[in-house]
Image (tube, grey):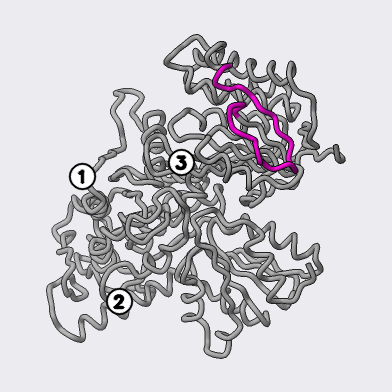
Amino acid sequence: MTEPIVNDLTIQAATVNGSGSQTANLVLTRAIFHMGIPVAPKNVFPSNIEGLPTWYQLRITPEGHMARSDKVDILIAFNVATWREDLKTVRPGGAVIHEEAFATVDARTDVTYYPVPFSKLAKAKIQSDTLRKQLANMIYVGVVGGLLGIPWEALEHGVKRQFLSKPKAVQVNLDAIKVGHDYWQDNFSKQDPYRLEPMAGVVEGKVLVEGNQAAALGALMGGVTVVAWYPITPSSSLCEYLIAYSDRFRFDPTTGEKNISVVQAEDELAAVGMAIGAGWAGARSMTSTSGPGISLMAEFSGLAYYAEVPVVIFDIQRIGPSTGLPTRTSQADIGFVYTLSHGDTKHLVLLPGTVEECYELARDAFDYADRFQTPVFVLSDLDLGMNLWMTPEFKYPEKQFDRGKVLSKEDLERLAGEWGRYRDVDGDGVPYRTLPGTDHPAAGYFTRGSGHDEQARYTEGADAYARNMDRLSLKLETARHALPPPVVDESGAPVGLIAFGSTHAAVIEARETLAAAGKSIDYLRVRALPLSDDVAAFVARHTHVYVVEQNRDGQLYDLIRLALPPELVGRLRSIRHYNGQPIPAVAISEPLMQLEAVPA
């Protein structure tokens, strides 16, 4: 056996969807995290309810890398249908825990096998016929615990944490884990190099949170009062988390009455229509969807843009076009969402790159929507939204809500009723509005998706239309300087990287790899559209800039090229990853090593 490999490995569980394996995987994840060891889980699951292959990758690194790895050190093979292909993914010297009945004739000889009779153990040791299928997965948690030296106390913590709301389920799951743990101790001796040892000072102050969960909490902190939605993978859990949080925190303690309205609409078109109507009425409103739903929302998005109605729309991106791969991740909506609708339309788009930013930008999106009286899109993706990520604990917001330019009864009295709904008074393109129910005879106005002048009167006048469109463009320019600026990390290197969203985790690791190979790379992460002026300045400071994104066509690359002065366009290069799997660091570092002639 080679030298021990401690706290630096990737586990992959190959199981069947709907079998209860995800619960077992999360128990294992939380147990290892409890040891103070950084974890980065990725779940790859099919778009059916039950029966197809699913994979769960749990990456463990002392540095806390959060990107997916394309190498597997320990395979848990629980699915005979994918057994042969799964075996190919294990690196030489790796370990394979597998169902004893799986054939190993002509199998690889450069890995260590640990055959376990999971089916027989489940039948003999688990008395409940109804729970046997689910608890069989817990047996492999026990085997992995024995293999890697996970303390029983950590495994116990993982189970209790996973079943916080079902404490009666704790003991039966611990019993199943003990079956696997005992089988390891009684039948195997350690033949592989992989070990886990407790760490200190690395994960303290951090929690494991999904991006959709963080966004739901951010929306709650942002003051959302109306939620209209229609279920669609991978965005459904955002509203489901929001409903759960609302049940706990959004009710009058005296009367028990809810102070938030959540409506499951008949489809995405109805959902966004309800949200826009609520925004017009003065509520802080939102909907959440994915690419197919965004397609249906195009016309309504144009209405909210042109009529200047605040609303927040979450797009948790997945693979397209059409139905595509509903349970695979992507960043291919950014170009579409930015100009969603027919005609000259540009929206405000927020691009969180971490779970912490899912929380913060979800919260701030409602301020931006009110301040600029326009739809605000928050683009996450399946990887960021549905996987657990280590993150610092969230901060309670300290600033007050920004409701923007809303005229009260007193304001209208001071103005003697002289105001125009679409008039630019302050030179920033943002007009004033009133809310329905404002007690003043001049408070009312017509909200139109057709041509209108500064007083909100219907017109097809060419000059009035051009003035209105120019003012909307000016409003976009005002927003450009108010939205979250890019995050820049540079040391004067000649080559730079630009990325957005969940690609951030892979960029961090790729930069470390490149630096170790003698090539420092500067980095700018875009956090909003329209693009900040900082992007062009960053390109100007570098000879080559690589735009890294998870789509086929290089959509951000194209948006940046359109925004650059002609003399800078030639400095841009494009690195694209679009197979539906979260981008690994090597998908960035290897192309750069080749293109920039960095010695491997």
Whole-angstrom CA distance, mark 2 to mark 3, is 34 Å
Marks 2,3: beta carbons within 8 A: no
| 2 vs 3, front mark | 2
Q: Of marks 2 and 3, which one's residue comes earlier in the chain?
A: 3
Residue 406 shown in magenta: no
Q: Nearer the viewer, residue 421 or 510?
A: 510
| 1 vs 3, front mark | 1
Query: Which type of secondary structure does the marked residue at label 2 adopt?
Result: loop
Q: Residue 246, percent across and down?
A: 37, 34
Whole-angstrom CA distance, mark 1 to mark 3, is 25 Å
| Quadrant location of the N terminus in the rendered image | top right
Which region of the structure is painted magenta?
99-120
Reply above or below: 62 against 123: below
Point 73% across, 41% down: residue: 109
Q: Of marks 2 and 1, which one's residue comes earlier in the chain?
A: 1
Reply above or below: 165 against 355: above
| Residue under pointer 2 | 344
Point 32% across, 49% down: residue: 287
Reply above or below: 535 against 462: above
The local crowd at label 3, few if under 14, some if 14 to 19, many if 20 or more residues have their Cα within 10 Å, is many
The type of residue carrying mark 2 is: Asp
Query: Which type of secondary structure does the marked residue at label 1 adopt?
Result: loop
Reply above or below: 157 against 465: above
| 2 vs 1, front mark | 1
Q: How many marks?
A: 3
Give the label on residue 266, or none.
1
| Residue under pointer 3 | 217
Q: Nearer the viewer, residue 429 or 369?
A: 369
Locate residue 304: give its quadrant: bottom left
Q: Residue 272, percent across and down?
A: 26, 53
Q: Residue 568, percent across and down?
A: 58, 86
Q: Of marks 1 and 3, which one's residue comes earlier in the chain?
A: 3
